[in-house]
Amino acid sequence: MAHAHEADRLASVAALGDPVRRALFTLVRASGEPLSREDCAVALDLPRSTALAQLDRLVESGLLSVEYRKLGPRTGPGSGRPAKLYKAAVTEVSASVPERHYDLAAALLARAVERSMATGAPVAESLGEVAYFEGVERGEREGSMEAVLDATGYAPQDDGDGGFVLANCPFHRLAREHTEVVCSLNGALLTGALAGCADPGLRVVPDPDGPYCCARIQRT
């Protein structure tokens, strides 16, 4: 569920609120190789016990991952236990409340411009196509329209007639500043998602007076 994913991202951001954990994450992320707790403790002048506890907290938060590997030239029996090494599980951390997906809008716009440059088609036409097929892929992957809406940050709410009111716009700030472009992208994305879900009983309808999103999903 999207709200669970957003909660995970918020937990990751909260974990980096501690200056020691933030310094450890920055150190490990910038390193070209996995680091041991000893490496981290020496680099940041920390007690080994502190480095271990905070590194493991970053692992629990999903920011770092662990691998075990023997260090040095010796192998086989008597060569010692494998070292516990830490590496970045993510390269960046972001979260927002309410949920936003400006990265998705940016990717679709970039792909539309690339398609327009390659084919000579108008940018608006290209944007409609790439957004539609992105929606199709999401619909096929999620299996239901409600799941797509939830995973993409629309915060769907039952409208009482088998459809959904979209209680959040994943592209809110962009939609306010570039309404025509973003609402066109949004409509194509949702229409594609319906096609991918193969649910003929639903349709995308404009909702320009809605408090959150410019569209809603209506049961036919």
Image (cartoon, helix red, strand yellow):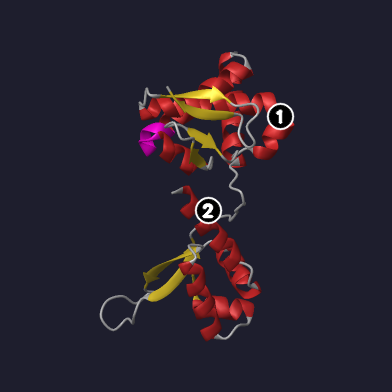
Q: Name the residue under label 1.
A: 178
Asked if labels 2 and 1 touch by Cβ distance under 8 angstroms, the answer is: no
Front-most of residues 174 and 117 = 174
Q: What element carries label 2?
A: helix
- For the point 37% across and 30% down, which residue is it? 197
Of all residues, the one furthest to the left in this rendering is 77
Question: Is residue 217 inside the magenta stretch?
Answer: no
Q: Find residue 41 and name its label.
A: none
Q: What residue type is labelled 1?
A: His
The segment highlighted magenta reads 138-144
Q: Which residue is drawn at 74% across and 32% down?
A: 177
Horizontal arrangement in the rendering, residue 150 relative to residue 122 (left or right): left
Q: Which of marks 1 and 2 is nearer the N terminus?
A: 2
Location of residue 66 in the rendering, given as x and y in whole percent from the top left corner = 42, 67
In the rendered image of this protein, does residue 169 appear above or below residue 11? Answer: above
**In this rendering, does residue 187 appear at all?**
yes
Marks 1 and 2, how far apart at CA? 25 Å
Q: In this view, does 100 lie above or below 176?
A: below
Quadrant of the rendered image containing residue 11? bottom right
Q: Choose top left, top right, bottom left or bottom right for residue 122.
A: top right
Q: Tell me the amino acid under the disc marked 2.
A: Glu
Q: Residues within 10 Å of mark 1 (few under 14, many from 20)?
A: few
Which numbered circle lies on residue 6? Answer: 2
In the image, what residue occupies the spot 47% across and 74% down?
56
User: Magenta residues: mostly which secondary structure?
Assistant: helix
The percent coordinates of residue 181 (x first, y second) are: 66, 25
Residue 40: x and y in percent read 56, 76
Residue situated in front as seen by the camera: 186 or 58: 186
Work out whether residue 71 can be spotted: no
Of 14 and 85, the residue lying toward us = 14
Quadrant of the frame with the C terminus: top left
